[in-house]
Image: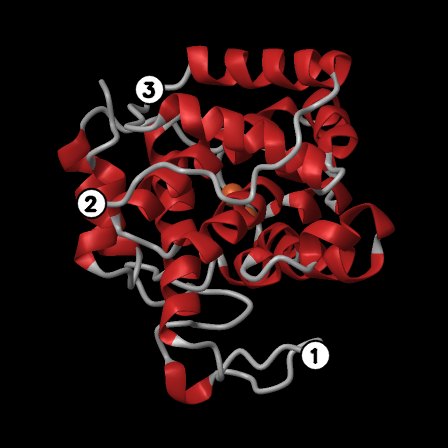
Amino acid sequence: MATAEIPFLKEQLPFERAERFGKRLARVFERANVTLDHKKETLEAMEGLAEKHKISDFLIEFSEADPETFSHSMRMAATAYDIALEAEVPAELREGVLAGTMLHDNGKRSIDEAILMKPGKLTDDERKKIEEHALMGLKNLLEDKRFASAARVPGVKEITIGHHGYKKSVDGTRGAYPFDLSDSEHLPEDFYGMNVKGWDERMRRVVAISAAADMFDSAAHDRPYAKALESSEEIFTRLKLTSTLPDDLILYAVRRFAK
Ligand SMILES: [Fe+2]
Ligand SMILES: [Fe+2]
């Protein structure tokens, strides 16, 4: 059984920033209908990571500019970290799981808010715009100095570009983007300097965990475009129908539905 030790956590947040970031996290979790097995350790790890990689200012700014995506990202990070512990992801990769999921939708900061918050059905053009957030997020990690430290953690860039890589549409018209991680034959070998085809088994698992936590969070909570599903059975069925994720990861995620 994996333990919840936090090997990468060496520093504490300075009091004032810890309080601001911690309060926001606490509010996010008050409203979350997610049960976490390692809640205290996870919250401490999130605060510690934010300080270690100097992203707490970005996260506070994110929470003020786009509370919806910020809350989604923090819930998803906690869920993914919990799954990573249960799935016995090695300690050296858990830092990437947590930092990568906290930052996975940073590219949404560059997308027009009217499209992001649009309730109901999107046009094809609007959908394409939103789908650009994965690539924009990766470019931000590569170019924006605020992310220089976090971007070096193995898994952070991979989660940011790959968290929609296990999507599948029921009608076959659209699915994973910007590439389909379930189709290992056709993955790029040089994508903005990344050899996606060469990701090893453990890295694929880390990205799949992030995708499971992302899809779970979208199904389990009200989002601008859809109401939350009501039961773990419905969420399981939704994820089975709309993803190419392995069953064990879907189950690990769905077990956290607390309603
Ligand atoms: Fe996303
Ligand atoms: Fe997301």
Residue 173 in picture, x, y percent from top left: 40, 66
Nearest the viewer among 48 and 26 is: 48
Residue at the image point whose x is 24% and y is 21% from the top: 258
Determine which residue is flagged by label 1.
193
For the residue marked with disc 1, what is the amino acid? Answer: Gly
Quarter occupied by the N terminus: top left
- Mark-to-mark CA distance, 2 and 1: 36 Å
Q: Amino acid at mark 2?
A: Met
Q: Residue 244 is drawn in which quadrant?
A: bottom left
Q: Nearer the viewer, residue 71 or 195?
A: 195
Q: With respect to residue 11, does 212 lie above or below?
A: below
Residue 229 lies left or right of residue 202; in this view the side is left
Instruction: Identify the residue at image location x=23%, y=38%.
Output: 254
Q: Nearer the viewer, mark 2 or mark 1?
A: 2
Name the amino acid type tagged 3: Asn
Disc 3 to disc 2: CB gap under 8 Å: no
Image colouring: secondary structure
What residue does disc 3 label? Answer: 33
Residue 64 at what x, y percent from top left? 73, 20
Which is nearer the N-term, disc 3 or disc 2? 2
Q: Is residue 231 visible?
A: yes
Closer to the chain start, of discs 3 and 1, is: 3
